Image (spheres, coloured by chain):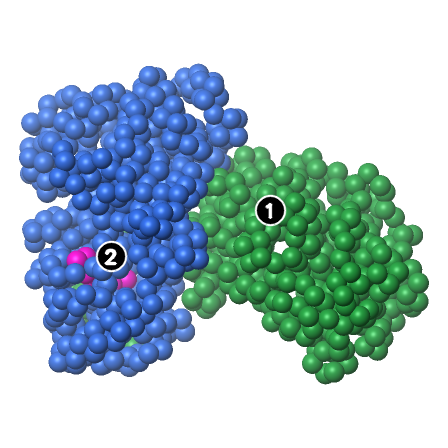
């Protein structure tokens, strides 16, 4: 910006130019600044034998170098995996440094692939990076750890290096068009809409509700709550004609071709039913549809993607939904990583919770929650369930210090590990849509999963609408 | 790998063979669980570096043979005893955020990574102490202490990621040290594993929760700031303070460096009890910050130097103290930049230091650069001369190549009287272009930066340590007879030279012609 006064000119300029403070690149700088010969040739480039690796480092070397060259590791203590493993090999810094080492031929994809399992792709490291935090992305040097992790995983798969559990998971997903979220119990296309039994929802139409695999087959109380909330508000929507997994998990684990095939199917199916708008209740799907699909399809992707919790906040604000049944719980809210850290969505869920009568809400601000995670993302629970459990236990511990009885989340994938961790501490884990439905007098039905169903006092769930929901807490259902 | 082998007085040494490494691993598995012994390439490559630049094409030279993740003092001691028995190098690694390569293995061996020792063992509210594993960061510790209204005020630029153990090993410097003291003042006592694997509890006298003792030699300082060459701190008892109720951090602008320099001196000498520190931004620093107006708060062109001061305490202490400092600043031609900039900029200080991951070539091309900072402890009256000389050294580099960029200088008060300043020059380094020739230029510049400091009665480092290539050659000159005392202590405590070998010319303790070697170093 500024040129300091009294710049020398003429022959003295070259000698003095560098001893005075100046801004390189300004129009009125002495021309002589460009006249120095550079004595440094730079190190000889290393030629990499593997063409895939060559292409990979060409694409990612600068992005990773920006972290490598800083090396200050502000990301370390916010990283959920680092918090439970304390292993520097599994930090954002290492994930970038490895790429630089690969460029130099010091490491190969086979050396590094297994380390990259240890990431939930929560995005905390990117937010905490000083490079992102204060300068924005003016020079396009923003730290991109999530993208680098995905790219390394994809390079591994392309190179025939598989993590055993991920390989099985994605093969079974490919066979059944949905993730094997019920373990050994097979899931299939004909059951993908079972969660909606009795709700009388049409198929197709301009607006459809997309339900992720975990919610459709495991925590069915969530989509049931969502569907009935939207029905109560008079929102018109249908279910998808033939819904496949969004493909996001495959993309996160490196199975990019499979992810694209699934995305292609879903987009074609939306076209076939005249769908223009997709309602999404799961933050992971929201990432897939707003980041992956546009990348795969470019301008062809003209589908409007609406996050249900944002829509619901609008409906409450407009008076089309009025939570009135008191819910006597002491809660805190878990910011799902993909909403808070990846998408900057943290206000609307709080608005929804503040509209529910009866709740005592001990909130924790969104920045503090950068270091919180359930451990349920990025394929971690598939390959390393013990780390997911430890991360969830950490999260529950934070909730426990607030003396709450309930942790409210807005992400079905977080709710299973959090419920399991919460069970031992007597903290119930409830989805924001479940608890809102309760306050709207809806008898939700469906399942809150093994742990949730076992617990009394539900925000919807397996009581199946028998009228006992919340009754034990003295609320007028 | 022959980085240091040709130095005067050093004995040749060899890395472990693969068979020897296997033997060490087998013995370690008798001490630690399998998941605590790390041998993969990535485990080793990612424990070879610190933020200080080093040619990437030479990364492999610094890779350790393996790393361990102990979880207790006993485990650390057992690992070190084994290394002592087998004559295997041991390199302690805490946060790995240091700028003088303390945590960098120069001769392979075992990296002892203490990050899993991050528990809070005891919070003593009555004596105002906390006892922690040295693998905890100050950020995480203070998150817990905040619930009790307390703070551990050790506040380096690496506050979010450096660890208590690294602060001990480097004898760290704290941004608010003028009010609360630095790491050496804040750490009361600690458990320390000696190079033989014996465990020492060290502090003033008996250690424990005692802040001042006259009993025996004062050993605490000896086991702080040794850069891992005398052992590994594992558990520390720390002094705590009430979390301050009020913070005041005015920023003032000046027409030129000289006015700002006079002002910062007057502020520091004022003797205000809540004064926690002052920072002087020189003209190169202001010009540098101005490059990226999109990121920084813009200032008019006639702002050429800045001073900020910070005060902590109770509201009814800080307000009158602030009035006094504002009056002093006004008398020195300062223009207050307003509450918003002052509060925001101070809050951002920790994150700012690492912000620039790009620099500029002389003709303005934006390129990825790493930040590096050279520091010295300079007494007040020598600040302007050192500042000028250091900029000239970097200007010389820039005349020869665009690998280096001048990012300006800061001077921070170290004490509450204004006697000396942590003085730093920030240098952008285009590491992707750092070949052997550029590296040699940098090492020579570092040597000249250190020599300049010594010529002005300064110490080579206020905060980083001085054991990197370049500056390390000047340490025997700086310490005089004290350097030979260092050698004697090293040889006594570490008879087999296993603890972080290759640092601080301590090889000289183990043979060769010491007199000739020292003569050569001191004549540089």
Give how far apart the Cα atoms at labels 2 and 1 are. 36 Å
Whether residue B333 is situated above or below residue B357 in the rendered picture: below
Q: Which chain is green?
A: A
Which residue is at the front of the view, A125 or B201? Answer: B201
Q: What secondary structure predominates along the stretch shown in magenta? A: strand
Q: Colour of chain B?
A: blue
- Compared with residue B348, is residue A46 higher up or lower down, i.e. above or below? above
In the image, is A474 to the left or to the right of A200?
A: left
Instruction: Depth check: give the residue in front, A399 or B369.
Output: A399
Residue A435 as seen in the image, left or right of residue A71: right
Q: Residue at x 48, y 21 (%)?
A: B29
Query: Quick check: is B408 in the magenta stretch?
Result: yes
Q: How many marks?
A: 2
Magenta region, residue range: B406-415
Q: Dot 2 lies on which element? A: helix
Mark 1, other Cα within 10 Å: few <14 / some 14–19 / many ≥20 = many
Pick the residue in front: A406 or B56.
A406
Magenta span has A74? Answer: no
Q: In the image, residue B185 lies at what x, y percent?
A: 22, 49
Residue at label 2? B180
The image shows residue B306 at horizontal and vertical percentages of: 23, 72
**B397 left or right of A44?**
left
Rendered residue at 14%/22% (across/down): B512
Q: Nearer the viewer, residue A466 or B332?
A: A466
Q: Residue at x 25, y 80 (%)?
A: B336
Say which residue label 1 marks: A393
Does residue B139 show up?
no
């Amino acid at each position: 910006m500024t040129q300091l006064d009294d710049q020398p000119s003429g022959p003295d300029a070259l000698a003095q130019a560098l001893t005075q403070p100046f801004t390189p690149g300004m129009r009125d700088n002495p021309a002589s600044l460009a006249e120095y010969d550079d004595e440094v040739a730079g190190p000889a480039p290393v030629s990499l034998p593997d063409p895939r690796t060559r292409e990979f480092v060409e694409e990612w070397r600068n992005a990773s170098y920006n972290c490598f060259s800083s090396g200050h590791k502000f990301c370390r203590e916010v990283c959920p995996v680092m918090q439970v493993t304390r292993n520097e090999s599994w930090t954002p810094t290492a994930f970038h440094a490895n790429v630089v080492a690969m460029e130099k031929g010091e490491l190969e994809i086979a050396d590094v692939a297994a380390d990259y399992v240890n990431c939930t792709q929560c995005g905390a490291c990117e937010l905490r990076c000083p490079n992102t935090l204060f300068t924005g992305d003016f020079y396009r040097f923003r730290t991109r750890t999530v993208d680098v992790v995905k790219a390394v995983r994809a390079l591994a798969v392309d190179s025939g290096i598989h993590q055993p559990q991920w390989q099985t998971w994605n093969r079974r997903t490919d066979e059944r068009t949905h993730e094997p979220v019920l373990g050994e119990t097979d899931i299939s296309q004909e059951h993908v809409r079972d969660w909606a039994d009795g709700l009388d929802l049409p198929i197709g139409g301009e607006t459809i509700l997309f339900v992720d695999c975990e919610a459709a087959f495991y925590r069915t109380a969530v989509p049931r709550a969502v569907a009935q909330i939207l029905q109560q508000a008079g929102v018109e929507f249908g279910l998808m004609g033939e819904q496949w997994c969004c493909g996001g998990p495959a993309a996160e684990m490196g199975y990019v071709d499979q992810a694209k095939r699934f995305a292609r199917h879903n987009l074609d199916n939306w076209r076939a039913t005249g769908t223009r708008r997709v309602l999404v209740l799961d933050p992971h799907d929201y990432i897939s549809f707003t980041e992956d699909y546009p990348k795969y399809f470019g301008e062809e992707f003209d589908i409007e993607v609406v996050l249900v919790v944002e829509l619901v906040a609008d409906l409450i604000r407009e008076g089309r939904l009025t939570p009135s049944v008191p819910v006597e719980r002491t809660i805190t809210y878990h910011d799902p990583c993909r909403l808070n850290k990846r998408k900057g969505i943290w206000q609307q869920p709080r608005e929804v919770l503040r509209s529910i009568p009866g709740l005592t809400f001990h909130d924790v601000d969104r920045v503090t929650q950068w270091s919180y995670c359930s451990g349920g993302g990025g394929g971690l629970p598939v390959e390393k369930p013990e780390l997911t459990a430890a991360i969830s236990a950490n999260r529950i511990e934070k909730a426990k210090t607030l003396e709450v009885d309930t942790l409210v989340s807005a992400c079905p994938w977080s709710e299973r590990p959090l419920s399991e961790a919460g069970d031992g501490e007597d903290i119930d884990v409830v989805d924001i849509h479940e608890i809102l439905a309760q306050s709207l007098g809806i008898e939700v039905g469906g399942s809150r999963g093994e742990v949730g169903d076992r617990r009394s006092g539900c925000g919807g769930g397996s009581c199946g609408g028998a009228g006992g929901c919340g009754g034990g807490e003295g609320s007028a259902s | 790998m022959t980085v240091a082998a040709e130095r005067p007085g050093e004995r040749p040494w060899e890395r472990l063979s693969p068979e020897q490494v296997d033997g060490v691993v087998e013995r370690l598995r008798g001490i630690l669980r399998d998941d605590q012994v790390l041998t993969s390439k990535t485990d080793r490559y990612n424990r070879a570096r610190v933020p200080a630049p080093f040619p990437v094409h030479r990364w492999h030279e610094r890779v350790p043979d393996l790393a361990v993740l102990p979880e207790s003092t006993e485990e650390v001691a057992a690992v070190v005893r084994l290394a002592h028995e087998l004559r295997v190098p041991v390199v302690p690694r805490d946060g790995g955020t240091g700028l003088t390569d303390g945590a960098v293995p120069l001769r392979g061996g075992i990296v002892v990574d203490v990050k899993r020792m991050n528990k809070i063992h005891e919070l003593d509210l009555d004596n105002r102490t906390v006892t922690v594993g040295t693998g905890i960061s100050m950020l995480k510790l203070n998150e817990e202490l905040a619930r009790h209204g307390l703070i551990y005020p050790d506040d380096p630029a690496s506050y979010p990621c450096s660890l208590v153990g690294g602060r001990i090993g480097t004898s760290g410097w704290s941004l608010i040290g003028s009010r609360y003291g630095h790491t050496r003042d804040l750490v009361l006592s600690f458990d320390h594993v000696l190079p033989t694997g014996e465990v020492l509890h060290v502090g003033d006298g008996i250690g424990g929760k005692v802040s001042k003792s006259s009993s025996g030699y004062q050993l605490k300082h000896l086991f702080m700031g040794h850069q891992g060459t005398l052992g590994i701190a594992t558990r520390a008892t720390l002094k705590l303070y009430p979390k301050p109720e009020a913070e005041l951090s005015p920023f003032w602008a000046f027409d030129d460096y000289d006015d700002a320099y006079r002002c910062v001196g007057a502020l520091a000498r004022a003797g205000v009890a809540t004064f926690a520190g002052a920072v002087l931004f020189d003209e190169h620093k202001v010009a540098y910050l101005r490059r990226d107006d999109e990121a920084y708060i813009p200032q008019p062109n006639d702002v050429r130097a800045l001073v900020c001061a910070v005060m902590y305490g109770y509201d009814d202490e800080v307000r009158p103290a602030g009035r006094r400092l504002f009056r002093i600043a006004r008398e020195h031609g300062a223009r207050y930049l307003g509450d918003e900039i002052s509060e925001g900029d101070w809050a951002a200080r920790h994150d700012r230091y690492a912000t620039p991951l790009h620099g500029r070539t002389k003709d303005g091309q934006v390129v990825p650069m790493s930040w590096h900072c050279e520091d010295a402890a300079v007494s007040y009256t020598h600040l302007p001369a050192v500042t000028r000389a250091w900029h000239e050294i970097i200007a010389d580099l820039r005349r020869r190549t665009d690998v280096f960029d001048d990012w300006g200088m800061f001077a921070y008060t170290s004490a509450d009287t204004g006697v000396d300043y942590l003085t730093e020059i920030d240098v952008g380094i285009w590491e992707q272009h750092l070949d052997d020739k550029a590296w040699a230029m940098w090492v020579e510049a570092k040597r000249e930066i250190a020599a300049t400091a010594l010529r002005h009665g300064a110490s080579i480092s206020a905060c980083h340590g001085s054991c990197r290539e370049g500056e390390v050659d000047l340490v025997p000159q700086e310490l005089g007879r004290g350097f030979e005392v260092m050698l004697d202590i090293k040889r006594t405590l570490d008879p087999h030279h296993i603890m972080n070998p290759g640092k601080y010319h301590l090889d000289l303790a183990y043979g060769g012609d010491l007199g000739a070697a020292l003569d050569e170093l001191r004549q540089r």
